[in-house]
Structure formats: structure tokens, C-alpha cells
Amino acid sequence: MHEKEMANPHMTRARKQLFCADHHTLVLFYAPWCGHCQNLKPDFDQVESVIQARRMAHVIRINGDTAPQMLQREGVQSFPTIRLYTPDKKKIAYQGQRDASSILTFLSQHLKLTKKPKKSRKKASPKAVKKAKKAPKKKAAPKKAPKKSKRKTKSKPRKK
């Protein structure tokens, strides 16, 4: 760890979150003086609120002016740079439009591709199987005949 990083605990925490094994992290590398970053801010705020509401991933904003060593280590060469870091330590660079819907589309596509398949149900233990076999079976209720409707049908008028 570098001396500057040790002096800034926020950057150390951000670095750990980038490569956390149990979640995805969307990162915005920005500079406060960058016009494109300033234009992106409202859209990225919207993206962040959607992500947090749906608990899709973690979001980190890294100011390039206060963390130049992290920019160098991560190979960031321009602002704004948006990347998705996956639990298996892959970096996926965002190359699309700088608007909320495009970023969310990118994120949802990559989360679907990188999510691990759900674990299958556990098999019942032999004890549980024996217990289920010994339990008395409930008798099924007899089926009732369908009720006849009391609804009157319109009949044709009688001829006199």
C-alpha cells in the first residue's frame, strides 16, 4: 500500500470494495473540473439511486484529483471513466452513451451474464425421508358434485 493511500482511509476502503468477492461494483472515475463529468453527474445520480433501490451492485465515485495513484494502477486515462468490477475480478469498461438508461441497460445486461446460477435444492436426509413415510396420510376430502345453477334461462314466449 502506498503512503498516500494509507493517509486516505476512504481510498483504501474503495480499493477493497473494487475487488470484493461477493458483489459487483460500478465505479465512476471523475474529475471535478471536467465538463463531461459535470454533465454526467445528474444521470449518474439517477443510476446510483436505482442501483441502491434494487440492490443490484455497489457504487463508488473516485475523484481523480485526490487519488492519482489509483487512476494509474487501474489504467484510467480519461474522464469520465465508468467500469463494472465483477466478483471474479474482471473489469468491464462502459463505452456507451452517457445517460442513465444506457448505463442501466449496460449494467443489467452484464449482471445477468455474470451472476452465478442458483444452488439446487438440498436432498432430504434419510431421517427426514423415514419420518415422512411414517406420518399418517390424510384422507382426501370427497369431491362434491357441481352445483346446478338456479339461473333462469330466457325462454321463447308461448304462442296462443
Image (tube, rainbow, N blue to C red):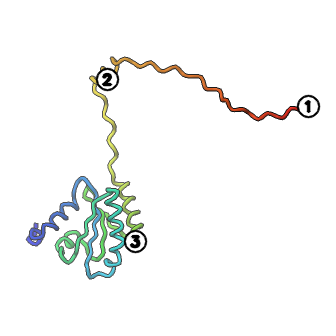
User: Which residue appears at 35% of the width and 56% of the height?
Assistant: 54
Classify 92 as above or below 127.
below
Q: What residue does disc 1 label?
A: 160
The x, y position of residue 23, in whole percent, is 26, 55
* Mark before the other along the chain sequence, 2 or 1: 2
* Mark before the other along the chain sequence, 2 or 3: 3
- Could you tell me which secondary element the residue under label 2 belongs to? helix
The x, y position of residue 62, in whole percent, is 23, 71
The x, y position of residue 143, in whole percent, is 54, 22
As drawn, the label of residue 99 is: 3
Amino acid marked by disc 1:
Lys
Q: What residue does disc 2 label?
A: 129
Image quadrant holding the C terminus, namely top right
- Could you tell me which secondary element the residue under label 1 belongs to? loop
Q: Are marks 2 and 3 in contact (CB under 8 Å)?
A: no
The x, y position of residue 100, in whole percent, is 39, 68
Q: Are marks 2 and 1 in contact (CB under 8 Å)?
A: no
Q: To which quarter of the image does residue 92 belong?
A: bottom left
